[in-house]
């Protein structure tokens, strides 16, 4: 695994806060992640250090498919302008990603969103492969539990040899909390992403975590997987790794802040511009 992982993830947090950069004029890599719950844009230096980043909640993608093309273009254009202001120069290209199970004909919409927002799409990668650009796992399973999808990749000798995705993720956690506590979705979502609420909510969402664990196990059982690496925003729910480990019987790790792993990996796939 990448020995600098914690450092990179800390730098990603700082990149979100950074309002301007002090004179960096080297080439940059840019990545746009169009997610079910969050859309993010990160810019890295040419040696992959996070410079600036932004993310926002948006409902423009469902099950990995762009369902609001105009809304997605407007949002990416706005985020691009904000980031250019903070950088002090224009961005011309970016990489983006898709959940592994989405047909390539549908994936094209993701590329068109970038192009309509003024960014040349330099690379289109699947999400768990993007995540592994950051994790640098040689052997194991990388599981990206996002808002609407869970992407699974089995890595052997540093190569992704199997990918899959399933339509389950953090949105289901929120729906369960909303139903159980009889509160609106938005309120349930706000409580769910607050770590202080996690101990109280754990028993409610545990069955959904167990379901995610059995889905992961179904996919990785044919392979010799020694360790599962959890990324994606839903992996930030405290204690999820213990549940996945008990269902699968396989050692499970959440590496630092899991929310930014895939967005950073997407940016790492951008050709230098
Ligand atoms: P997908 O990959 O399915 O298209 P996405 O890219 O939007 O979705 P992520 O950005 O990785 O997915 O994660 C978003 C999900 O993570 C949301 O459901 C959000 O509620 C959840 N999430 C974010 N932060 C936390 C947190 N601290 N605790 C629990 N869940 C969180």
Image: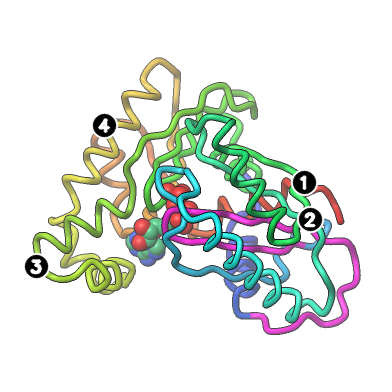
Contact between labelled residues 4 and 1, with CB atoms less than 8 Å apart = no
Contact between labelled residues 2 and 3, with CB atoms less than 8 Å apart = no
The residue that mark 4 highlights is 214
| Residue 83: percent from left, percent from top | 70, 74
Seen at 64% across and 61% down, the residue is 8
| Residue 22: percent from left, percent from top | 82, 82
Q: Is residue 168 left or right of residue 121?
A: left
| Residue 51: percent from left, percent from top | 73, 70
Numbered circle sitting on residue 182 = 3
Sequence-wise first label, 1 or 2? 2
Q: Quadrant of the N terminus?
A: top right
180 is higher (above) or lower (below) than 90: above
- Mark 2 secondary-structure assignment: strand
Contact between labelled residues 2 and 1, with CB atoms less than 8 Å apart = yes
The residue that mark 2 highlights is 93
- Alpha-carbon span between mark 1 and mark 2: 6 Å
Sequence-wise first label, 1 or 3? 1
């Amino acid at each position: 695994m990448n020995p600098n992982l914690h450092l990179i993830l800390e730098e990603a947090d700082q990149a979100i806060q950074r309002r301007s950069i002090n004179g960096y004029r080297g080439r940059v890599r840019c990545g746009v992640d169009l997610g079910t719950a969050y859309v993010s844009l990160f810019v890295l230096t040419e040696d992959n250090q996070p410079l600036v980043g932004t993310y926002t909640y948006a409902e423009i993608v469902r099950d990995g498919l762009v369902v609001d093309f105009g809304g997605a273009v407007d949002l990416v254009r706005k985020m691009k302008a904000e980031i250019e202001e903070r950088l002090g120069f224009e961005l011309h290209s970016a990489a983006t990603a898709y959940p592994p199970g989405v047909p390539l004909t549908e994936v094209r919409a993701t590329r068109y969103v970038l192009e309509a927002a003024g960014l040349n799409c330099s690379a289109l990668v699947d999400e768990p492969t993007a995540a592994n650009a950051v994790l640098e796992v040689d052997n194991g399973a990388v599981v990206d539990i996002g808002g609407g999808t869970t992407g699974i990749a089995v890595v052997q000798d540093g190569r992704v040899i199997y990918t899959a995705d399933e339509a389950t993720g953090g949105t289901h956690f929120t729906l369960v909390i909303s139903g159980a506590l009889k509160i609106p979705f938005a309120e349930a979502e706000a409580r769910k992403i607050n770590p202080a609420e996690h101990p109280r909510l754990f028993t409610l969402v545990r069955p959904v975590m167990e379901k995610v664990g059995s889905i992961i196990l179904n996919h990785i059982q044919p392979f010799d997987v020694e360790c599962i690496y959890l990324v994606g925003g839903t992996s930030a729910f405290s204690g999820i790794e213990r549940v996945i480990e008990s269902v699968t019987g396989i050692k499970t790790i959440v590496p630092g802040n899991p929310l930014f792993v895939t967005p950073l990996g997407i940016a790492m796939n951008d050709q230098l511009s």
